[in-house]
Amino acid sequence: MKILFVSSEGLPYSKTGGLADVIEGLSRALVEAGHQVSVLLPRYRGNKIASVLFSGVTVALGDQLRFPSIAEPKSPGGVHYFFVDDPEFFDREDLYGDKNGDFPDNAERFAELSRMAIEFTKRVWLPDVIHCHDWQSALIPLLLRRQHANDPGVRSLPVVLTIHNLAYQGVFPRGTMQKIGLPESLFTADALEFYGNVNYLKGGLIFADYLTTVSKRYAQEIRTPEFGSGLDGVIRDRGDRLVGILNGVDYAVWSPETDTFIAQKYSASNLQGKKACKADLLKAFKLPEENLERPLIGIVSRFADQKGFDLISEVCGELMRENVALVALGTGQGIYEKIFQDLAAKYPERAAVKIGYDNALAHKIEAGADMFLMPSRYEPCGLNQIYSLRYGTVPIVRATGGLDDTVQNFDAAAGQGTGFKFEKYNGQALLDCLRTALSVYRDPAAWQAVQANGMAKDFSWKTAAAAYVSLYEAAKRARIPRAVGTSKK
């Protein structure tokens, strides 16, 4: 099967979050399964071009014409990557915004990406299915079904849209319709209108042949007002076409048996190297060796409300009284950066933080920590808890989204389970869960059991790729779009 991915970011060329990892891992797994995969990305600053396939492609965005190119980088083996090259739109320091917030022309930038994806299918490579990722490419199914409805070459191309995080929807003022060249007839409840604004993701949800999100639990959660971010009515309306497929991870990159960033490799059958990794992690954060005897909690995250940092800030004082050590890596909301900085200042022998992102240090935390903390308010899938399982770093998570799907609560009596979970979103529930984990940590045999259980789990991309192929086939059988009825907001 010929599959075209369209995304705003993807490794090895661009990354702000887990979406980029998914693009790389899933596309590679599909190729390994015998399929042909092309990935279309914007060409951001620093991305080098090997050749230009089509220059000056005409794209109408409202009253203006733009002339981006379709270019090809030197692709890694197997997956073919292509760029939409428009320096004015994409040659910037960051992908989506700067210190002042989102770029004011994001609506036009990613409308161009969607329009260029259709031009790509006509000029370069006609796929069997288009797989769109998040709001930045969600206009593609709408454009195919409405503006290209009479184009025999592309009008019936099947489209699958994946929701990686429903909180990000691409919502813009009504005037965006004119800016991106869409008629007012599409500014309706059955298309793009969303409480007086334009919503790119909503258009994709309505017009795509099939919808996916990145865990089974999250697929259920987003049908509810609590997690639906205003689109739960639309999602319930399309519930028969929504499938939860758990993300995979790339064990060629994230495994203690092969990791080149860690002090000593180790495996489930021989955990000796993990102690060396813990010592190396303490050294990286300039914490004393005496912490080798303490349980070491690791965090790698965006510091934001979504990730549960309001809960961490609520209980961090009580947590530190449990005689633990804590290392954190991340960046985000200033209030949470300061909380970790203050914690490190108050407990300089047991707590440390690095503000920013450091890939090598992230690997060291996965390998060297004893526990990994992810108390998210919501988590569509999450990858770090899956990495942690493979590294024998026991995850402590809230039972939501992909965290609930991937972590099994440890039952000491039965010796079964891979981590520790709590349900209620409050500081006391988090603290109780942490204390349960610490009590198990003090029993070496029980702790080794939970480590071994987690390290035995397989969340590779192979399973997810097979599920997507089945969905692509279903989308091909459903090429005629459903009759669009009245949708709830």
Image (tube, grey):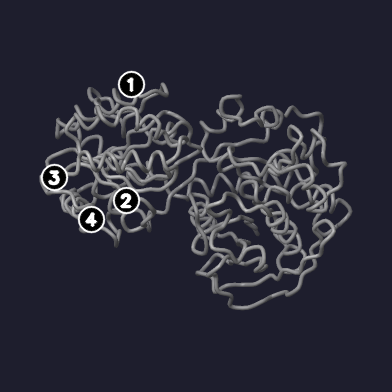
Rendered-image quadrant of the N terminus: bottom right
Q: Which residue is mark 1?
A: 428
Amino acid of disc 2: Lys
CB contact under 8 Å: marks 3 and 1: no
Please tell me whether mark 4 sits on a helix, a strand or a loop: helix
Q: Return the mark for residue 354.
A: 2
Mark 1 surroundings within 10 Å by alpha-carbon count, few (fewer than 14), some (14 through 19), many (20 or more): some
- Nearer to us in this view, 306 or 279: 306
Q: Quadrant of residue 50?
A: bottom right
Q: Measure the C-alpha gap from mark 4 to mark 2.
A: 10 Å
Q: Amino acid at mark 4?
A: Ala
Mark 4–mark 3 CB contact (< 8 Å): no
Of the image marks 3 and 2, the number of the one nearer the N terminus: 3
Instruction: Give me the C-alpha separation between circle 3 and circle 2.
Output: 20 Å
Report, in whole angstroms, how far the alpha carbon at label 4 lies from the one at label 1.
31 Å
Q: Is residue 1 visible?
A: no
Considering only order in the chain, which callout, 1 or 3, is on the residue closer to the N terminus? 3
Whether residue 162 sits left or right of residue 56 in the image: it is: left
Of labels 4 and 1, earlier in sequence is 4
Quarter of the image where the C terminus is located: top right
Distance from Cα at disc 4 to Cα at disc 3: 13 Å
Q: Residues within 10 Å of mark 2 (few under 14, many from 20)?
A: some
Q: Which residue is mark 3?
A: 292
Residue denoted by label 4 = 284
